[in-house]
Image (spheres, rainbow, N blue to C red):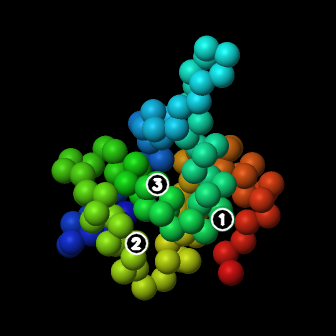
Amino acid sequence: MILTIKDKDYELHFGLKFIRELDKKYEVQQSGIVFGAGLDTVLPALLSYNIATLSEILYFATITSKPRPSVSDIDNFVESHENVEELLSEVIEALQSANGTKLKTKMYVKDMGFQIK
């Protein structure tokens, strides 16, 4: 998936670097054990049409871009997008296709009965 922001193309990657970055932000500690809960945190929010989460996912998916767009650039892109439902659907489809995210994403989509309106 490619985003064009300010006339520059950014390829989104939903691989291990993406997951690791999410896990760093969404760490859970239980009984002295620390583990990442990135996808488990963002997927329910994304599937509940949370646009702030959509922007955050897009930002983390640009982890391999050099230079990388700013959070503000991505927020502006999402806010001004002509069809945010379509963008949301494309991101979910990409998450369901990428090796690193597809199993968990498909599980949440099924469990939450997600459908684009």
Residue carrying label 1? 48
Residue carrying label 2? 78
Q: Is residue 97 left or right of residue 9?
A: right
Residue 43: % across, % down = 62, 52
Which label belongs to residue 57? 3
Eye-nearest disc, 1 or 3: 1
Q: Is residue 12 left or right of residue 102?
A: left
Q: Is residue 23 left or right of residue 117?
A: left
Give the CA separation, mark 2 to mark 1: 16 Å
Q: Quadrant of the N terminus?
A: bottom left
Q: Quadrant of the C terminus?
A: bottom right
Taking the image as drawn, is residue 90 in sight?
no
- Judged from the image, the secondary structure of the residue bearing numbered disc 3 is helix
Q: How many marks?
A: 3
Amino acid on which disc 1 is placed: Ser
Please name the residue shown 60% across and 24% down the image.
29
* Callout 1–callout 3 Cβ contact below 8 Å: no
Does 79 sit above or below residue 90? below
* Callout 3–callout 2 Cβ contact below 8 Å: no
